[in-house]
Structure formats: structure tokens, C-alpha cells
Amino acid sequence: MRGINLRRALAALVLAAVAGGGALAAPSYPVKTITFVAPSGAGGAFDMARRAITKALTDTKIVDQQMLVEARPGGGGSVFLAEYVLQDIKNDYKLFLTSPTMLINNLKKEGNSPFTYKNVTPLAQFFVDYAVIAVPANSKYKDVKALFADMKSDPTKISVVGGSGPGAVDHLAFLLPAFKSGVDPKRVKYISYDGKAEAMAAILGGNGDVLTSVTASVSEYLEAGKIRVLAVNAPQRLGGVFKNVPTLRESGIPADFVIWRGVFGPPQMSAAAKAYWIDAFTKLSKTDLWTQELAKRGWDAEFLAGDAFTKNLDQQNKDLSELLTVLGMAK
């Protein structure tokens, strides 16, 4: 009889704890380690952004669960995206960071991805990175107009090095101003590497004439005097090591190309997980620590979350489709 009463008492305690939200209630999201993926090689722009975000989330204690970082190079992110969409459909514990590359891989004629932002869950855009056109420090080119003038006569004599495949972000970021300057984009000799760190090593090693990259990936090399940045694709001059670098518009070349860095979740992300991350990322964007990180990296703050981020993606998807059509590279 005492055993029966004891079991009843324990059952009553469990029910009371659950009903009252006590210690025995089911824990809320997140309850285990989160994996944060950058679909690119280690040391590149994606990897740098991913590590900065996860470290800031941990340092500010906005996220108290352990966050593992993982680099997944291959196909400009398309290999990872295919696996993610098909295998991590409801995996709330795996997020990834990417850029307009995801849109481009789906839109271009020779694109290698049937998937795009519409197949996953957009969470937040953290910042924008500006495209740059750079050359080795000993290059004869002192400004971008001189470079494009030479390329107009014969684009094949000048090799352009980038950290993404043909028709991807680095390539298009260079082709757009070249095209606006009268260069035949179909004749540009472009050499692709799987990552911006590899592209930088190539240009410094003499395996190319011009580098197309982004501010965050070239700042330390510019400061060290190893390269010369001919132009930055920003609305106005940047500060710091880029203070003397003219914008493309200053050079009379209107060719805006915004390169964002954003975080996404799985296709069928739970409402609880989506709300958690949008809230966490929004909080981080307002901290002094993140403001300092942006300034240190040369990133321009342009935070968007949830529906606002999706709306921005819709517009850029349309713009990129039009650009690729003009270049003869659209599907």
C-alpha cells in the first residue's frame, strides 16, 4: 500500500512540475551543440565572417550553448547546399553562412545548383562587404581606368584572379565594371580559386595580373604594402587602410554590386528555433562588441532579419537575373 501511495505521490510531483514549468518540464531550444557551417575553404571571407559571428555570440553570452564551426568547400557552396537541403530538412542545430553566391549558382546558365534561398530559411543579413579590384604592389597599373583601357584592346592579355568560380561573386563583381567600361566580358581571362585566401596567394605569387576580391580579405595585405587597390565598389570612400582608395563611381564607373553575408537555417526550421535565432542575431547587432568587430574588419553594418532579409533577397535575385542575362550567362 505504501508503494502505491509513493508512486502516486511521485506522479503528482511530476505532473505539478510540468504544469508549473518546473525543473522537470521539457527544456526549450537550444539544448545541445550548434554547428555553424561556412561553405568554403578555411581562411576565406566566409570562414572569417562565420568565426567572427560565433565568437561574438559566445563572448556576449547571447548564446550559451557550444557552437562548432565547420568549413565545407566545394562547388562554390553548392555541394554543401544540396546535402543540407536534402539531409538536414528539420535540423535546427545546423546553420550556415553564405553570400549572393547561393543566388548566382542557381541563376547562371552553367549553374551547378538547383537550390537557392527559397529552399532554406533566411534568418539574418549581418553586413555587406565591398568588392575591390587590386594588383600586386609592383604592377604598372596605378588606377582602374588605365587597367580597363588596356583590357578594351585585348582582354585576354590580362589575367584576372578570383576566389570563386566563373559566373560567381568575384567574377561578376569584376565583370560588371569592366562591361560598363567597354570591355567585352566574354573575353576576360578569369582564373578561379576555391577561396579568397588561395586567390591572394596566387596573385602574390605572380600567377595573375589582377585580383578581384572584397575589402575584408585584402585589408591586411594593403596595409602591409603587398598590393595596390585600384578601386572599391562602395557608395563612398571607406576609412582606415582604404581611405586613399577611390570608389568606382569616382572613376566614372557606375556599377554597384552589393555583397552581403547572411545566415540561414534548414528548409523546415521550427518556429521556436527561427524565433530564437532572429532574436539572438538582432541582439548581437546592437552590441558595442559587434560594432567594434565591424569596424575592425572593414565591414559595413547593414543588418536585416527575417522577412526584411527575405525581401532583400527577392530584389537581388531579380537584379542578378537581369545582370546575368545582359552578360549572356543566365539560364
Image: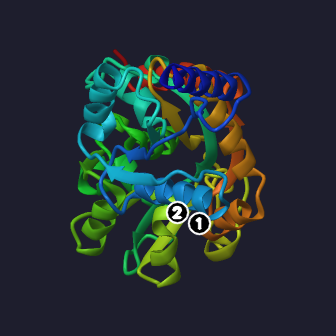
Q: Position of residue 16 (x, y in %)?
A: 69, 24
Q: Position of residue 65 (x, y in %)?
A: 52, 51
Under tag 1, what secondary structure?
helix
Q: Residue at x 33, y 30 (%)?
A: 81
Determine the CA span between mark 2 and mark 1.
6 Å
Residue 305: quarter of image: top right
Whether label 2 touches label 1, CB < 8 Å:
yes
Q: Position of residue 300 (x, y in %)?
A: 68, 54
Residue 114, numbered label:
none
Within-10-Å neighbours for mark 1: few <14, some 14–19, many 20+: some
Q: Which residue is mark 1?
A: 297
Residue 301 visible in the snapshot: yes
Question: Which quadrant holds the C terminus?
Answer: top left
Q: Which residue is mark 2?
A: 216
Q: Residue at x 37, y 43 (%)?
A: 171
Q: Position of residue 104 (x, y in %)?
A: 41, 29
Question: With respect to residue 203, does 183 lie above or below?
Answer: above
Under tag 2, what secondary structure?
helix
Question: With respect to residue 162, does 282 lie above or below?
Answer: above
Q: Residue at x 71, y 26 (%)?
A: 308
